[in-house]
Amino acid sequence: MKRSISAGGLGLLLLATAVESVRADAVFAGFYRGGEAPEGIYTFTDPEHPFETSKRVGEWPFPGVSWQGLGFDGDHYFVINRGTSFGGTGLHEYDGATSLPLISGTDTYSDWHGIGYAHGVYYGLYHGSSLEGPGLYIFCDPADAGRTCVRICTKQTFPESVWSDVGTDGETLVFQRTDAGGGMPGLYTYDPEGDRFTRISGDETYEDWEDIGLYDADVAPLRNRTVYLVLFGGQSNALGWGYHQYLLDRGDPLAEVQNDVYLLYDIAGTGYLPENHLIKLQSGTANTVVKPHGHYPELTNTPICRFGPELSLGREVRDRISIPGVEVAVTKFAHGGTSLYDPDDWKADGTADRSADGNIYRIFQETAWRAIAALRHTYPRHDVEVLGMGWVQGESDALENRGQEYAQHLTDFIADVRATFGSDVTFALSKLSPNQVAGSTDTNRLAQWDLVLAAQESVTAADPNAAATSTTGAVYSVSAGYDEGKLHFTSGALLQIGRDLGAAIVATSGIDTDGDGLPDAWEHGFAPGTAGLSPEADFDGDGVTDGEEYRTGTDPADPDDRLRIRRDSASTGSW
């Protein structure tokens, strides 16, 4: 499957955390509660003169006793219903005329007092006692806000007694202040980095208004760039037994923080790095405990900084997608000892409805949605696209004698990932390794191993947008002599698995980041890469364009490797 994007408009990147002012052509929306006009939702364009520049939306009054919080995306309005009418308590989406469906499922939003919306992300003011405490959160799934949200603007808690609502166009955050509390009521923008509020409503106190939304039509057309997100999951070898010390001892650049790749991960145990927040890719996403005696290196003190294949996977994808203005991120959730058949683990029903999915898989999906929300907020001028998924799993299904079911479970799982995150998602798995069962005399284990391995190969072979990477050879070395046997890969092997998966995802997806008609995987197979090859150019000077060499399968960097066409007197061509 081939994807392309435009490289145009690669100017200054404006992050959502850096914009403090509202553009002159922005449109606000709010509940009007004054006596000079009927109650209801109104839009207005001047925050200093809201009533004078207002226009009523629809005819519904939205009485204040029942309706709170207002988000606005230019076409639709997102409102919190405290009553039982119109489908019940929770978050509703209003089309500005007659439609007002409930979109929050069974979530009543009783702990939320403000709602904003932009770029596919909901912004919510939370005042409950769970999550990470009161504050501003972002999420993508309105029916599961609490389990898919990420806290932002952590220097403020935005108490309900002071701040009633949040509005945003994706770049600028606007809050409505409802009591003095040391400051004047009205509308304020907020700068998270400087922890600074700036009043934008002049002398207007907004005493006749409740809950404000914000939309800027000029922001959406600027989204002509892409953040490619790679999903990563599996069982213990995905969680990872790689040691940061291994990277340091070898002078591997991956020992340092990878500042050009983002990461968001979750872990069932205790991670070395902050969880469920967008950070830069680095080692530290696995458990902090020490492996059994004798495992490299000989470390006895905790915490231990460790990693899985996601480290080299993210680096590989970033290196293969190097065009300016295109960003790369990885999200990870893995859990040791888990299978594709167990309803407590990764079992999937093949649909976008995660209610029937396994518990571990649901946590994985929630983690991915947090990453998507965080990336959309961080890059308001980018579209976030799930490029592919890396998968390292299968041992448990073989060890628990469920190998004969693996093909169907894997097929359902891939279908579920695509139903949830996009039909174009490339799926790449790392196959079980013969090194993991080398020397075993357990005929049943060997038979089950072969069943799972055959399923991995057959399912991916039948899927044009899937790939299976080999783990045969000495580079895929395993730990030996420990309680868990030879099932776990060494640090070096985990790095190679990640590189293999990253290369497979880029190659199988057919991604073309510079939009020149030459897939990135083909361009990166030769020394020039995307920066040196183009369809009309002739990099090696052999008289054949790079585009022609791509179509005929020759090397664009080797002048002696080219397709020659000889024409005879009858003007017929021969190869």
Image (spheres, grey):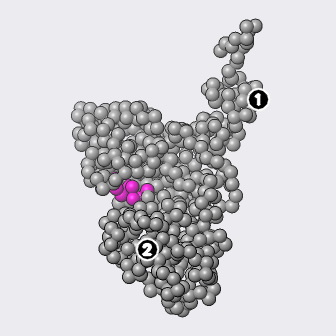
Residue 192 visible somewhere in the drawing: no
Residue 3 screen position, x and y as percent: 56, 42
Q: Nearer the viewer, residue 92 or 456?
A: 92
Q: Which residues are magenta?
A: 361-368
Q: Residue at x 27, y 38 (%)?
A: 405
Residue wearing tag 1: 541
Q: Earlier in the sequence, mark 1 or mark 2?
A: 2
Residue at mark 2: 60
Q: Position of residue 229 (x, y in %)?
A: 51, 52
Q: Residue at x 69, y 42 (%)?
A: 531
The picture quadrant where one finds residue 140 is bottom left
Spot occupied by residue 409 in the image (x, y as percentages of width and height): 31, 41
| Location of residue 151 with respect to 536 vertically, above or below | below
In this rendering, the label closer to the viewer, 1 or 2: 2
Between 367 and 126, the one nearer to me in the picture: 126
**Image quadrant of residue 510?**
top right
Tag 2: residue type? Trp
Q: Locate the C terminus by quadrant.
A: top right
Q: Secondary structure at mark 2?
A: loop
